[in-house]
């Protein structure tokens, strides 16, 4: 995940429009230089790290530039305002003081960026469905998902780790009605590719440790392993190594069985490092930057 100059420029333009909109809670709340007195630093609203873009105007900009028709700063700013307006209409209790989604001027940094995180998800869904303004079903799903996952206090979003986890739960709920949408662990695959898997916290159902010996499968019992994969479609987002541990086969066998059962390998995988589970894009693994695929193949890459 790389932030392009166009992403950051568009994010700052969105921040300027939010700060200048009299009908937006962010009106005159964003500070663009060291001399201002506004409480919210533009740098906090435009963080570029892979684990921060889900709750950043940079992530919103990335979504807006990822479809056939790029979205304007005005349209993207509108999604932030609409994300708040929907709650004012359908779940005003979530906007009360000291809540996860308390808007400015009473917002903490954590609640301010959580509002942006909802707008990122809203913008992606609207682009996906071809909506210029959120439809009634989109509004209902937005409010329901927020009511289910973002009803806590400001302490629940005071650090980045908690915010990522909350955002992941919200996004899973917000897109749960779109059954035909390709997902990994309940998260839209393309959204994970546009942003970063680490922006949405840990997986909802991490890969278990190796099964006891009595529950492992022999490498020869391929049909039994295939049945296990067919009955657990969420394993399509696991790494070959994790599937191998679960099924009692080696990584190469797991890779072959994965392709037989699931078809093309997902572009986003769940990985485990040092006891932590998170998602990682794998579409560019094995490819040499700046070289065509044929050149990699010819060199054995």
Image (cartoon, rainbow, N blue to C red):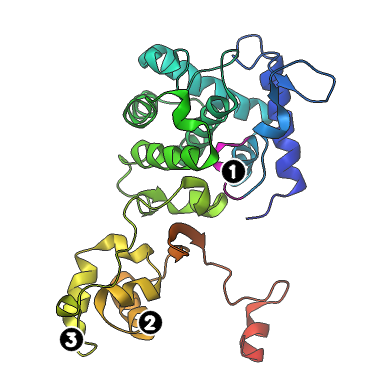
Please state, as top left, top right, bottom left or bottom right, where the N terminus lies in the image.
bottom right
Please state, as top left, top right, bottom left or bottom right, where the C terminus lies in the image.
bottom right
Left-right relation of 83 to 2: left
Query: Disc 2 marks which residue?
Result: 251
Quarter of the figure with residue 137 = top left
Query: Disc 3 marks which residue?
Result: 221
Q: Is residue 52 magenta?
A: yes
Above or below 236: residue 202:
above
Query: Disc 1 marks which residue?
Result: 52
Q: Is residue 217 magenta?
A: no
Residue closest to the eye, 201 or 135: 201
Residue 162 disc label: none
Q: Earlier in the sequence, mark 3 or mark 2?
A: 3
Magenta residues, start to end: 50-56
Residue closest to the eye, 166 or 141: 166
Tell me the residue at 71%/76% (across/down): 291
Decide: few, some or many residues near mark 1? Use Cα within 10 Å; few <14, some 14-19, many ≥20: many
Disc 2 from disc 1: Cα separation: 32 Å
Q: Earlier in the sequence, mark 2 or mark 1?
A: 1
Q: Position of residue 215 (x, y in %)?
A: 16, 76
Decide: few, some or many residues near mark 3? Use Cα within 10 Å; few <14, some 14-19, many ≥20: few
């Amino acid at each position: 995940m790389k932030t392009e100059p166009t992403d950051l420029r568009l994010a700052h333009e969105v921040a300027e429009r939010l700060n200048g909109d009299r009908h937006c809670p962010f009106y005159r709340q964003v500070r663009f230089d060291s001399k201002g007195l506004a409480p919210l630093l533009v740098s906090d609203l435009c963080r570029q790290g892979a684990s921060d873009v889900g709750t950043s105007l940079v992530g919103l900009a990335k979504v807006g530039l990822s479809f056939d028709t790029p979205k304007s700063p005005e349209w993207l700013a509108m999604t932030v305002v609409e994300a708040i307006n929907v709650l004012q209409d359908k779940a005003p209790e979530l906007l009360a003081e000291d809540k996860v989604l308390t808007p400015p001027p009473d917002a903490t940094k954590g609640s301010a960026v959580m509002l942006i995180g909802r707008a990122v998800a809203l913008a992606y869904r609207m682009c996906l469905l071809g909506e210029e303004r959120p439809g009634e079903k989109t509004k209902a799903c937005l409010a329901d998902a927020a009511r289910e996952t973002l009803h806590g206090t400001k302490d629940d979003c005071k650090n980045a780790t908690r915010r990522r986890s909350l955002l992941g739960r919200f996004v899973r709920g917000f897109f749960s009605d779109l059954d035909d949408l390709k997902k990994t662990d309940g998260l839209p695959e393309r959204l994970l590719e546009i942003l970063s898997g680490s922006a949405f916290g840990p997986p909802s159902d991490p890969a278990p440790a190796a099964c006891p010996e009595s529950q492992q499968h022999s490498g020869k019992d391929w049909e039994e392993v295939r049945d296990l994969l067919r009955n657990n479609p969420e394993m399509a987002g696991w790494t070959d190594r994790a599937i191998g541990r679960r099924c009692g086969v080696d990584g190469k066998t797991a890779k072959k069985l994965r392709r037989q059962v699931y078809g093309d390998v997902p572009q986003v995988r769940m990985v485990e490092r040092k006891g932590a589970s998170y998602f990682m894009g794998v579409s560019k693994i094995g490819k040499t930057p700046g070289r065509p695929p044929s050149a990699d193949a010819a060199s054995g890459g």
